[in-house]
């Protein structure tokens, strides 16, 4: 591959990264930068179920499915003691809606005129949303499991001309009259729902019922004032730090340092584009991970350039010194980045919320820095060497050596 082709590839990657950022803008911000709702809940015993570790694990799983159904990014759902759960929802401003979705036990029951339960949410396979046949609102479509379908068909055959009441958490939603037997395990809940109400109800049913009720201990809106101050300080620190790093590379490594600065700017574009493409949510810890990975990207170039200088001092020609420098520095760069990736993986596995965000941004940054340091910087320095092989040592601030 010729040097000119390599330069075109680098330019193409830069254009692609900028286009991706532009296409997927705006960014997704976390609770500390965007604000949202903070909820503290406590699980309550019932006569049938006592709160224990197994019950709390089920409660956490149900709440996480409901939060995911809300489409909330970078939400935090975590234990706080034996019975309490903390839920943080970035970008959510309606406290009552968030509270009703999280706390609702979502026990679905179909009852005959005598109040006997025909089928329950345990017999439900999935719930969806569609338009009401009478075009007076939205409806929730239900699909039962094979066993639930048999129960429902038998009940509708028995109750033709009679109503079947549909209850959610002991509250009657509707009571349609059975006009004919309904085989196939499909039913619809109507009740002049809005699109949002129907979607929330379907999401509640799909996420399953809470095994115990939850008591609200605290619910409040969280402003992003502190986050805004923090992000301004972080951005300022990032800009100043990046400028000092670029200046350092320029002073100590001269023209190769300038090429490293070009590779670093490309790294920032690639890293940022990758995070935007992953629809990552940006938090203050995430921004810290991003800035930290910038430092690691520079560190790789420093290792490479110092190895090249060692090879030049040993008397190697310019091209041979560059190739040997990149080759011998690769092992050290790989080892340091792999160990950091392992630490990031541990943080992601055991962490929650913003800790996971930090791990993701750090991991993506490390992978991008490996590419720009080992591939892009290599191509740029090789291009420089091929153009002026006799001046390579001078580029690095050393005495001239043979080409």
Image (spheres, rainbow, N blue to C red):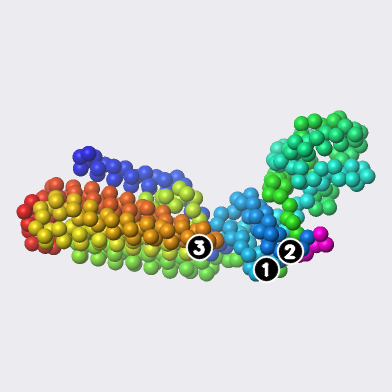
Q: Is residue 84 left or right of residue 323?
A: right
Q: Which quadrant of the figure has residue 10? A: top left
Q: Which of the two marks, 3 or 1, is nearer to us in this view?
A: 1
- Circle 3 is placed at which residue position? 355
Q: CA distance from mark 2 to mark 1?
A: 9 Å
Q: CA distance from mark 3 to mark 1?
A: 22 Å
Is 46 covered by the magenta stretch? Answer: yes
Res 317 visible = yes
Q: CA distance from mark 3 to mark 2?
A: 28 Å
Q: Are marks 2 and 1 in contact (CB under 8 Å)?
A: yes
For marks 3 and 2, the one nearer the N-term is 2
Q: Which quadrant of the figure has residue 299? A: bottom left
Look at 69% across and 46% down and name the residue there.
206
Provide the major secondary structure of the magenta segment. loop
The residue range painted magenta reads 43-48
Point out residue 401 in the picture as x, y percentages from the top left corner. 7, 57
Point out residue 321 in the picture as x, y percentages from the top left corner. 15, 54
Please tell me whether residue 312 is drawn above or below residue 184 in the rendered image. below
- Circle 2 is placed at which residue position? 51
At mark 1, the secondary structure is loop
Look at 80% across and 35% down and name the residue there.
150
Q: Nearer the viewer, residue 14 or 350?
A: 350
Q: Quadrant of the N terminus?
A: top left
At mark 2, the secondary structure is loop
Point out residue 100 in the picture as x, y percentages from the top left corner. 72, 57
Res 132 visible = no
Look at 28% across and 56% down and name the residue there.
331
């Amino acid at each position: 591959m010729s040097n000119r082709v390599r330069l075109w590839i680098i330019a193409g990657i830069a254009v692609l990264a900028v286009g991706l950022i532009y296409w997927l803008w705006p960014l997704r911000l976390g609770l500390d930068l965007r604000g949202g709702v903070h909820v503290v809940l406590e699980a309550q015993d019932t006569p049938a179920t006592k709160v224990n570790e197994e019950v709390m694990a089920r409660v956490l799983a149900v709440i996480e499915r409901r939060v995911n159904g809300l489409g909330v990014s970078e939400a935090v759902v975590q234990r706080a003691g034996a019975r309490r759960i903390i839920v943080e929802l970035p970008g959510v401003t309606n406290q009552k809606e968030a509270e009703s979705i999280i706390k609702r036990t979502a026990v679905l029951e179909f009852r005959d005129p005598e109040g006997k339960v025909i089928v329950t949410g345990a017999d439900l396979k999935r719930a969806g949303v569609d338009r009401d046949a009478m075009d007076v609102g939205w409806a929730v479509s239900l699909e039962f499991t094979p066993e639930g379908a048999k129960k429902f068909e038998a009940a509708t055959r028995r109750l033709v001309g009679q109503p079947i009441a549909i209850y959610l958490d002991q509250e009657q939603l509707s009571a349609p009259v059975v006009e004919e037997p309904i085989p196939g395990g499909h039913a619809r809940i109507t009740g002049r729902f809005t699109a949002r109400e129907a979607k929330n109800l379907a999401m509640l049913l799909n996420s399953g019922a809470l095994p115990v009720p939850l008591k609200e201990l605290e619910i409040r809106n969280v402003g992003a004032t502190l986050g805004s101050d923090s992000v301004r300080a972080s951005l300022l620190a990032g800009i100043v730090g990046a400028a000092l790093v670029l200046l350092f590379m320029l002073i100590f490594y001269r023209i190769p340092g300038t090429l490293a600065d070009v590779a670093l700017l490309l790294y920032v574009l690639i890293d940022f584009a990758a995070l935007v493409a992953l629809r990552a949510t940006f938090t203050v810890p995430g921004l810290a991970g991003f800035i930290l990975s910038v430092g690691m990207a520079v560190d790789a170039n420093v290792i490479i350039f110092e190895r090249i200088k060692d090879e030049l001092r040993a008397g190697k020609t310019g091209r041979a010194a560059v190739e040997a420098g990149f080759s011998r520095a690769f092992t050290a760069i790989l080892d340091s980045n792999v160990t950091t990736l392992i630490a990031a993986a541990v943080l992601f596995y055991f962490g929650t919320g913003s800790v996971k965000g930090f791990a993701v941004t750090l991991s993506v940054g490390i992978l991008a820095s490996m590419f720009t340091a080992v591939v892009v910087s290599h191509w740029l320095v090789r291009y420089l060497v091929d153009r002026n092989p006799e001046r390579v040592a001078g580029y690095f601030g050393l005495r001239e050596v043979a080409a």
